[in-house]
Image (tube, rainbow, N blue to C red):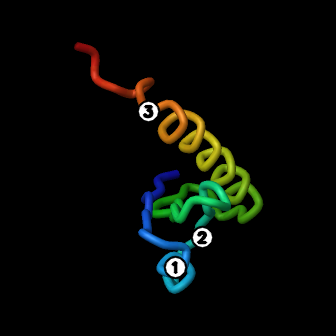
Amino acid sequence: MKVAIKSFRTHQEMDAYQPTRPTIQVRRHLPILLEVIEVDSTDEALIQINLKNMASWYFYTIIRNPDSHAPDQ
């Protein structure tokens, strides 16, 4: 599964966005969505489970701990 990260300046901008594919919000207080770009499965339940897992991973790995993906110096 491939997803695109959609960042918005405000929740109002995010609410106005009309996705054509499945999306999930990374965290309730953040105006960031993950939107499915490419998927191998047609099982909607499996897609939602994977989206939730990806959103959690993105939040805890990239947003809360940005130094974990910093290039080695």
Residue position marked by numbered label 3 in the rendering = 66
Instruction: Estimate the spatial distance between the alpha carbons at disc 2 and disc 1, rounded to whole Å.
Output: 7 Å
Q: Nearer the viewer, residue 48 or 14?
A: 14
Q: Earlier in the sequence, mark 3 or mark 1?
A: 1
Q: Tell me which amino acid carries mark 3.
A: Pro
- Label 3 or label 1, whichever lies nearer to me, is 3
Q: Is residue 41 left or right of residue 70?
A: right
Q: Which amino acid does the dot numbered 2 rest on? A: Pro
Which residue is at a point 51% across and 76% down the rendered structure image?
A: 14
Query: Looking at the picture, how far across and down is residue 55, in whole percent?
Result: 60, 49
Q: Is residue 45 above or below residue 64?
A: below
The foreground one among 48 and 57 is 57
Residue 55, numbered label: none
Q: Secondary structure at mark 1?
A: loop
Identify the residue at the far right of this view.
Answer: 45
For the C terminus, which image quadrant? top left
Classify residue 5 by image quadrant: bottom left
Residue 49 relative to residue 61: left or right: right
According to the picture, the residue beneath numbered tag 2 turns out to be 22
Residue plotted at (41% across, 26% down): 67
- Please report the residue visible at 47 percent of the width from the left and 53 percent of the height from the top: 2
Residue 32 at x, y = what percent? 51, 61
Measuring from the top left, give residue 51's x and y in whole percent. 63, 54
Identify the mark nearer the N-term, 2 or 3.
Answer: 2
Query: How busy is the neighbourhood of tag 3: few (under 14 within 10 Å), some, or many (20 plus)?
Result: few
* Contact flag, marks 2 and 1 (Cβ < 8 Å): yes
Within 10 Å of disc 2 (Cα), the crowding (few <14, some 14-19, many 20+) is some
Q: Single out the mark in the foreground, 2 or 3.
A: 3
Q: Are marks 3 and 1 in contact (CB under 8 Å)?
A: no
Q: Which mark is residue 19?
A: 1
Measure how far apart labels 2 and 3 are at the Cα level.
26 Å
